[in-house]
Image (cartoon, helix red, strand yellow):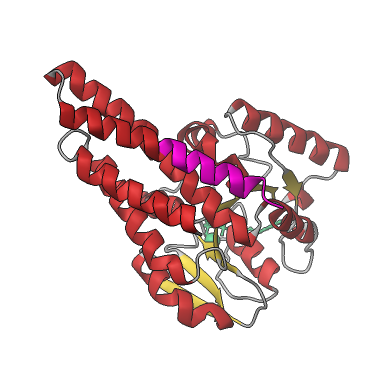
Amino acid sequence: MHEFHELLDTASLAMARSEGFVPEDLHASLRANVASLRRRSGFFGDVMLVALAGGTGSGKSSLVNAIVGGDVVRTGVVRPTTDYATAIVPSHLREAVAPHIARLGIDVQMTVERDSAIVLIDLPDFDSIEEAHRHIVVEVLPVVDAVVWVFDPEKYADPDIHRTFLATLAPYSDQFVFALNKADTIGSTDVVDAMVRDLRRLLSADGLTDVEVVASSARAHDVWGVDDVVRSMDRRLDVKRTAYLKATTDFRVLADRGYRACLEDRESNGDSDARALAAATFVSLGVQAYAVHHSMKHQD
Ligand SMILES: Nc1nc2c(ncn2[C@@H]2O[C@H](COP(=O)(O)OP(=O)(O)OP(=O)(O)O)[C@@H](O)[C@H]2O)c(=O)[nH]1
Ligand SMILES: [Mg+2]
């Protein structure tokens, strides 16, 4: 897509022009985004990377197994069970995506016979006693195209999850699917429905718009609702568009940060033409990212 390549060029230009005016971590994010998107150019829009994220024991690994229909990743009663990010790659995609996934810091890749354009990524928990787990989640979330957030009835209202993760990710609402898993542990369907509504309300208070929450049970031998999770993924996460929507949202967020950083730098160091040019380039980046995002989102 021509406009998308122009957007990457503007991002590179913003990087070059803002050197010294914006914080190094902003530069690093821009650099990583551009490099990763250029690396993916051969299969961008044909493959979608979807992570499963959530608290310990919410059933992420069980849900992965239920979605792919096999015991692919380890599940367990001893918490936490999953120690590293694992990509579940349909075999026909392996050659194209394996090197890219390895460079994202996802060490383990499992191949499954599955006619799908989705690479699922089973993450460790983010509320672990193991700080390393949270670290992995924080590293991996920004590099995937979409996330299935897996909650359970006990912890779905945990303020840490809402405040630390979801409220900061409000611009990415379109990239998310929500499962209230372990719904089988609640005896009454009325109570499950009330919890689904309550979770939807909490997500909306986090600033996430148009969310869908689906109740599921991924318990071995009592699987239900997982088809609804998959349908929610199909409805919300179009393979052709999702990677573009995610990337353009990243650039909108980074352009906004870059522009603000330039203004702050002016407060401290006074006017300069070079900085004004950097600020203007961030504005261009934001406008271009918005235009590509809008046209992808509303394309038939
Ligand atoms: N009743 C019930 N049990 C479930 C469900 N999903 C998972 N479990 C059980 O809950 C325990 C934890 O499941 P996992 O799939 O390992 O959970 P996880 O989120 O991957 O856990 P971590 O890897 O530690 O973060 C296991 O004993 C599963 O069998 C569910 O929907 N209902
Ligand atoms: Mg797990």
In this view, the residue in front, 65 or 276, is: 276
In this view, the residue in front, 200 or 117, is: 117
In this view, the residue in front, 61 or 232, is: 232
Q: Is residue 91 magenta?
A: no
Question: Where's residue 93, x and y in %?
Answer: 54, 78
Quadrant assignment, res 40: bottom left
Ligand 2 quarter of the rendering: bottom right
What count of labels does the image hold?
0
> Is 162 positioned to the left or the right of 181 in the image?
left
On screen, 141 above or below 117?
A: above
> Does the image show residue 176?
no
On screen, 285 above or below 92?
A: above
Q: Report the residue at 65% width, 48% height from top.
A: 177
> Does the image show residue 219?
yes
> Is 107 positioned to the left or the right of 213 in the image?
left
Question: Where's residue 54, x and y in %?
Answer: 55, 49
Question: Where's residue 137, x and y in %?
Answer: 43, 52
Q: Report the residue at 23% width, 27% height from top.
A: 276
Q: Is residue 297 magenta?
A: yes
Question: Where's residue 7, x and y in %?
Answer: 41, 49
> Is 269 positioned to the left or the right of 95 in the image?
left
In this view, the residue in front, 34 or 198, is: 34
Main SS category, magenta section: helix
Over which residues does the magenta segment extend? Answer: 286-300
